[in-house]
Image (tube, rainbow, N blue to C red):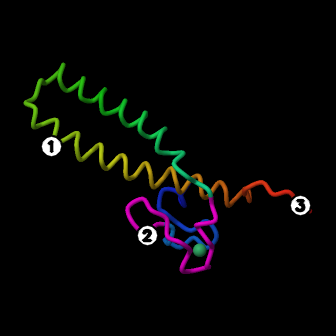
Amino acid sequence: MSAAALGLCPRCGRRTLFDGLARFAPRCSGCDLDFASFNVGDGPAAFLTLLIGTLACVIAGWMALSIDPPWWVYVVTLGPATLAMIVWGLRAGKAALLCAEFRRQASEHRIEP
Ligand SMILES: [Zn+2]
């Protein structure tokens, strides 16, 4: 969980997992673990879209019904909050899947000759 939350390499524990906001580095600069060999894909993106979209809509509905702010308050508050949740959620979700693959030594199926 800490490796996923902080973007730590699952083998050596250094903070080398990400090379951008939510993009994996090609390999760990500490232990040379090849991050590109893991098949994380876009699995967390669909789940996060549903979860964060629902949460943003619930908060917007609550704001409209309880305090009825002007439109720019939604833009100023919900816009950055939604972006922050998406970026953090993508980082944590992708890192959790990569760490799970590393821990369970999951890989593509191969037929041994
Ligand atoms: Zn490492």
Question: In 3D space, how far apart are the residues under numbered discs 2 and 3 (Cα atoms)?
Answer: 35 Å
Mark 1 neighbour density, 10 Å: few (under 14) some (14–19) many (20 or more): few
Instruction: From the image, give the main secondary structure of the stretch colored magenta.
Output: loop
- Residue at 61% over, 79% down: 32
Q: Residue furthest left?
A: 70
Question: Label 1 belongs to which residue?
Answer: 76
Earlier sequence position, callout 1 versus callout 2: 2
The amino acid at mark 3 is Glu
Marking on residue 19: 2
**87 left or right of 37 in image:** left
> Viewer-nearest of labels 2 and 3?
3
Question: Dot 3, how many residues are within 10 Å of its Cα: few (below 14), some (14-19), or many (20+)?
Answer: few
Identity of the amino acid at label 2?
Asp
Left/right placement of residue 48 relative to residue 113 reads left
Residue at 52% from the left image edge and 53% from the top image edge: 94
The stretch in magenta equals 18-38
